[in-house]
Amino acid sequence: MTETSAGSRDSGRATRKRPQEGNVVSRAWRSLALFVSQILDELRKVVRPTGRELVNYTGVVIVFVMVIMGIVAALDLVFHRLVLLILAG
């Protein structure tokens, strides 16, 4: 191992170890407040669909689910007939 890679690894550890400020309760409240503020920041980035887009997306999902249901039902019927052929003779 070279000196530069060992030195960079040690400096990474030094930056991660910060002295913790305040007592346990105040740190917990601060971390909770940070968590909630980050959630709100992410929610501001969400783009909500218009009513027309929502209807279109719903239609696409319903059609897709119906197609998959048809495929699964057809496969179920085929496997049912195969099992009857094999077991019932």
Image (spheres, rainbow, N blue to C red):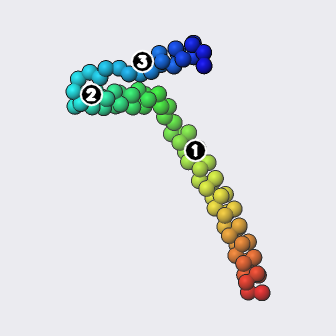
Disc 2: which residue: 27
Disc 1: which residue: 57
Mark earlier in primary sequence (3, 2): 3
Please tell me whether residue 73 is drawn above or below residue 53 in the rendered image.
Answer: below
Please tell me whether residue 43 is drawn above or below residue 4 in the rendered image.
Answer: below
x and y percentages locating residue 7 in the rendered image: 52, 14
Q: Does residue 39 appear in this view? A: yes
Name the one closer to the observer, 35 or 57: 35
The answer to whether marks 2 and 1 mark residues whose Cβ atoms lie closer than 8 Å is no
Quarter of the picture holding the N terminus: top right
Q: Dot 1: what SS? A: helix
The answer to whether residue 50 is left or right of residue 34 is right
Label annotation for residue 14: 3
Mark earlier in primary sequence (1, 3): 3
Please tell me whether residue 75 is drawn above or below residue 64 in the rendered image.
Answer: below
Q: Amino acid at mark 2?
A: Arg
Q: What residue is drawn where x is 57% and y is 12%?
A: 4
x and y percentages locating residue 42 in the rendered image: 44, 29
